[in-house]
Amino acid sequence: MQPNSEASQRIATIAAHLHPPPLQVSLNWRVRSQDRDDLFKINAGIVRTLCEGVAKCCPRAIVNLISNPVNSTVPIAAEVFKKAGTYDPKRLLGVTTLDVVRANTFVAEVLGIDPREVDVPVVGGHAGVTILPLLSQVKPPCSFTPDEINHLTDRIQNGGTEVVEAKAGAGSATLSMAYAAAKFADACLRGMRGDAGIVECSFVDSQVTDLPFFAIKVRLGRGGAEEVFALGPLNEYERAGLEKAKKELSESINKGIYFIRK
Ligand SMILES: NC(=O)c1ccc[n+]([C@@H]2O[C@H](COP(=O)([O-])OP(=O)(O)OC[C@H]3O[C@@H](n4cnc5c(N)ncnc54)[C@H](O)[C@@H]3O)[C@@H](O)[C@H]2O)c1
């Protein structure tokens, strides 16, 4: 094979990612030395390549996109699918379940009940201030003091950092991510099977705000996100959080879109 042939370049690329150190750098986020920009630089290209493969080989697949930064990788995937003529907004779902799992756990701790009995809508996006827990809409209905609201919001938004710090340099924020991914994939499968009332939060193409993508409750069905729910009534604290979230989200979404359109 000629060293410059297209095939050998492809093999070189794959080999580079099979070697353990680049793999760690390429896909694990929240390793201490990395910031979100480092992660974007590497994962953006990987997501583009994988989505080109999806468009070619399984264009009707319901895609659960978990690679970070989700706020940018979902717009990247959408652009790739649009270019390929296969984009169906209902079939592209950014996985934000980990934020909901954390929110349910932390709220349950405060309420002194089982996390499985708690439902906290977490909207916006999947990084820092873009993660917006709607504590006024928790089920079962409950109320929190201002201190509890500050503490819970901060803990939910920075759950990943808490895990990284607890590991003290021994790894990334892997706690519960497989559980969250499995929970979301299972919900999608139940929706595809035709089960009724399957509702999860997900980062999707939506008109909920003036942004093209937003994490929000969706009803999962045979065709993916068949219904996108409204935000519902927000209190003043949440409205302020939404403005902050939208500012950062807008930049992250545009970064993803520009990566493909440039
Ligand atoms: N959305 C979420 O809630 C959430 C939570 C945690 C982690 N993540 C993200 O999930 C991703 C995976 O994290 P992980 O800890 O499982 O990583 P990992 O390193 O354990 O696994 C990565 C997988 O990707 C494969 N891979 C590597 N390079 C590739 C390439 N060029 N093309 C195709 N496949 C390639 C590897 O073979 C491996 O199977 C990361 O982007 C991480 O940031 C998302």
Image: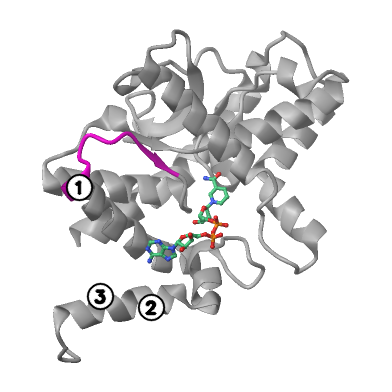
Please rate how many residues cluster around mark 2, counting C-alpha atoms within 10 Å: few if below 14, some from 14 to 19, many from 20.
few
Q: Residue furthest left?
A: 85
Q: Check disc 1 and report the residue beneath it.
A: 57
Residue at x 74%, y 53% (from the top left corner): 163
Residue at x 68%, y 12% (from the top left corner): 139
Q: Amino acid at mark 1?
A: Cys
Give the quadrant of residue 131: top right
Q: Is residue 228 above or below residue 60?
A: above
Q: Check disc 2 and report the residue beneath it.
A: 15
Is 28 one of the magenta-colored residues?
no
For marks 3 and 2 on the same chain, the one whose residue lies earlier in the sequence: 3
Q: Is residue 176 visible?
A: yes
Residue 145 coordinates in the image, percent (x, y): 83, 21
Q: Is residue 212 above or below residue 83?
A: above
Residue at x 57%, y 31% (from the top left corner): 183
For marks 3 and 1 on the same chain, the one whose residue lies earlier in the sequence: 3
Q: Amino acid at mark 3?
A: Arg
Per the rendered image, the range of residues in magenta is 56-65
Give the quadrant of residue 260: bottom left
Residue 230 coordinates in the image, percent (x, y): 43, 15
Position of the N terminus by quadrant:
bottom left
CA distance for labels 3 and 2: 9 Å
How many numbered marks are there? 3
CA distance for labels 3 and 1: 18 Å
Q: Check disc 3 and report the residue beneath it.
A: 10
Q: Is residue 182 left or right of residue 202?
A: right
Q: Is residue 12 left or right of residue 60?
A: right
